[in-house]
Image (cartoon, coloured by chain):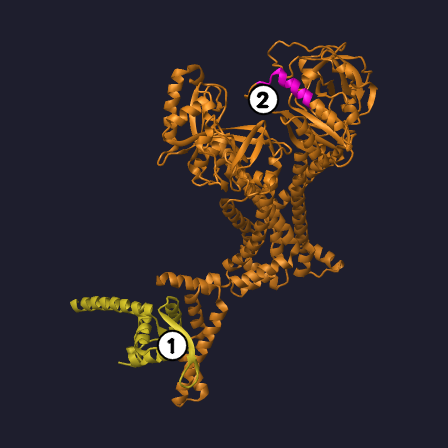
Chain colours: A yellow, B orange
Amino acid sequence: MSSEERRIELLQGSLDLIVLRTLSTMGSLHAYAIATRLEHISDHSLDLNQGTLYPALVRLEQKGWIKGSWGKTENNREAKFYSITKAGGRALAEKVESWRRLAGLVDKLLLES
Amino acid sequence: MSKIRHLFNRLLASFRGRGAEADLAREIKAHLHFLEEKYVAKGMSPAEARFAAKRAFGNVDRTKELQRDERAFRWLTGWTMELRLGIRMLVRYPGLTVVGGLAMAMAITVGTGVFEVVKRATDPILPLPDGEGIVGLMYWNRAEDDRQTPNSYDFLRWREELTKVQDAGAFRLVERNFSIDGGVAEPVMVSQISPSAFRVTRVPPLLGRTLVEADESPGSPAVVVLGYGLWQTRFGGDKSVVGRTVRLGDTRATVAGVMPEGYAFPVDDNLWTPLRSEELSREPGHDALKVFGRLAPGATIREAQAEAALIAARAAAAFPDRYAQLTPQVLPYANSIIWLSPELLVHAGLQSINAFAVLLLIVICGNVALLMLTRTATREREILVRSALGATRGRILTQLLLEALLLAVLAVVLGLAATNTLSKAAVDLLRVGPERWPFWLNAGLSPATVGYAAALTLLAAIIVGVVPGLKVIGRGMADRLRESSAGAGGLRMGRVWTGLIVCQIAATVLFTAIAYVVHRQAVYLASVETVFPTAKYLSVRLEMEPVGAAGSVPALDRQRFAAVVSELERRLAVEGSVAGVTVADQLPLMASPNPRAIEVSGAIPADRSKRPKVASSTVGPNLFEVFQMPVLAGRTFDSRDENENANTIVVNNVFVDGILGGRNAIGQLIRYESVEPANDRRSPVKPGPWLEIIGVVRDLAPDAGAPLNLDNPVKPRLYHCLNGSQRSSPLYLAVHAKTDPQWLGPTLRRIAGEVSPMLQLHDILPLDHASNGDTRFWRVFANLFMAGSAIVLFLSLAGIYSVWRFRRRRTPFRRQGEQDSGVKPNSNRSEATLVF
């Protein structure tokens, strides 16, 4: 299977879950670090332009699930760091539960067929 | 919760675009740097790394667009720019801003003013705690198809038997001389009211107490409760006023309390004394009382009405002649005082006034829209370029709507301020005189009116902004863009707009004509000059307080009144600042009652309907001397004419010219067609006695051919001499002052108080204020109409002129002329300047 064939397209709404989970696991990260983390986790199979993160980040920030603040990286470069809020933690738990139910249902349907 | 937060933050971000944009740009720049560093570390050249970073990131502009869509409501984000552009347009075209703004403000003033009046008439709201539960009780007389006020018998029955209405009370208004510690007496309206009124209205006193049930008992000491205004004006807001003694007519009463500012129940009252119910008749009589109460908890007006109907049925059984045709009515309190027919037609008629006001707004905004169209046309190139650069029609239309909305907002602020000021001025005007103005109709704007004004503003903005905008962005926009690129003109007037211009011209002609008529009348009013200096005369209405129970004034009272008035005249005449004093039933310049038909001795008897009609006054013998009315022939009155059987009269020269055909009037006999002033045409006529003309006096105003149909002072007039038996209350006293008559007021009150504490002085005013209420009203109306006409006229002319300029700009012939006159063709800025 070629690398092009291995690319995974994100399902609608799953990006929010992925970003929340990443921040929950890794703590405070800037957008580039989130994107890099996603690439590593997916073994470079996620079909995602890194710019796509920005609408998701502003959406999550406006919902009060993540909080962004400007800071410095190890290389002394300026970047906006995002961290998950308490409300974000609760939302993540709900989304994980919901995702698992959906995935279980889809698995079940696939196994039946 | 997060959804609401998201919505709120998006809304907030829509108005704070600049900071978020900068933040995003900074963040993306940092992101690209990280990517470049990664690719350089992998061995790429800087240029290759930059390219690879951009590829990995994706389209930066697209990312920004998506982030903006997510961050804010895009349709709101451009508002600051549009707003700035709108303000710039208002400043750039000051003529249009002023003319359009004023015109729209006038239309909004009319619209909101009418709405406020109609709302208060159809849906009055009592500004009292739980005011909607206060009701008034009255009768409907089915035989006469009219309202009928209840009497004390009804009130007492209702108070005892009604369970659906609690704290039923009643009031009547009487006029009394009010004085403090032997000071100058002044007539005031006193509300004799049941103490329950203060429970019904649920307003606590500011000082002391309200009236209580014990005050109703016949033997209880006399007490009064003061209104805030009276407390301020007569007691200087003295907080120790409770317990002080005041004099009401011939009664001394103790001040029990003071009510807070604004409290004026039952109508427009400032002084309350208890209505002593024990003294009221328990038999059906003619002592009219207004009855009120509060609906019992849970009771409805319908239930209260049904209960009152049962009581009325019992009354009808006991007194069929009186009650058989009467139906009791329980109404919201305000409706029981100012009655408005519940018929749908009446309400529809009132509401239709609103429709007319909206129509006026549409017409005026149509005018402004025409001006806007020409302005928009001068900006056609700019709009076409915007369109070519990708601005949608909706975006352009929104821009034009916002510009119009800005103008409309200016207009509504101005309009609401004008409505507020005018309503206060109107209420002040209406408060002058004997009429009372209910406290719930006080001036000011209700929240509903402000909401209505907002709706009118939006309507005005749509007409003024969107209608011309649709014309500009309508069909053929692409063609016009091409024509514009080729240097040719684009926008052309359609049939609708041409029709509008024709209407504009018609309106200009019509308003010019109306303005001419109104101006002519206003000039006439200003030119009416009397032969005497009205500003030097003080006028006052004299009345005598009734002694004992209310009812007919006996002959004794008349004699007493005549003696008091004579003494007052005598005392005033010797004052150093007084040039003359006289009395009359009607002073010069005052509105005349209905004229009476007369018959001239020796003249051919005319048909009854064609007989000449004259105004008449009964005057003191020295009136002509005091008012400096020159005697043109014969003599004026003297002691001989004060005899009841003298039958002598003096006439004015209009009478001589108009009725006697200019012949010698002295010795001529005339008589009234009927003895009674208001003779029923169906009844047999009994003519009055023959009256001999003994003198002719000059007219009070110089212009006998006055075009106004006002009650002006140049009608044919007869003067009778006032004799002792005619000196009945009320009479008007005129004092000719040597200086400013206003200074005579305190002297007059002092002397009147010394002559008799029972003598009431009303409406002490300079004669030019007191005399012609109709004329003053007409002047105010004429001035308002002139101002309105001037705005409409100016607007119409501005519209026509701007369209004329616009049309000239669009014709080749005009281009030649323009070049000749030195104006550059296609110069939008200079065009617009010329237009506005």
Residue kind at label 1, given as amino acid type: Gln
Residue B560 belongs to magenta span: yes
Numbered tag placed on residue B510 in the rendering? none
Total number of numbered discs in the rendering: 2
Q: Residues within 10 Å of mark 2 (few under 14, many from 20)?
A: few
Q: Are marks 2 and 1 in contact (CB under 8 Å)?
A: no
Nearer to us in this view, B673 or B238: B238
Nearer to us in this view, B69 or A31: A31
Q: Where residue A87 sits: x, y (%)?
A: 33, 67
- Residue at the image point whose x is 36% and y is 29% from the top: B163
Q: Chain of mark 1?
A: A
Numbered tag placed on residue B547 in the rendering? 2
Asked whether residue B730 appears in the rendered view, the answer is yes
Where B56 falls versus B198 (above or below)? below
Where B114 falls versus B572 (above or below)? below
Numbered tag placed on residue A50 in the rendering? 1
Q: Where residue B417 sits: x, y (%)?
A: 59, 48
Closer to us: mark 2 or mark 1?
Answer: 2
Side of B311 relative to B624 (left or right): left
Q: Find the distance from the CA under tag 2 to the CA under tag 1.
A: 101 Å
Q: Where residue B696 sits: x, y (%)?
A: 80, 20
Where B80 falls versus A29 (above or below)? above
The span picked out in magenta is B552-564
Asked whether residue B489 appears in the rendered view, the answer is no
Where B622 falls versus A72 (above or below)? above
Side of B704 relative to B202 (left or right): right
Residue kind at label 2, given as amino acid type: Val
Q: Chain of mark 2?
A: B
Residue B304 belongs to magenta span: no
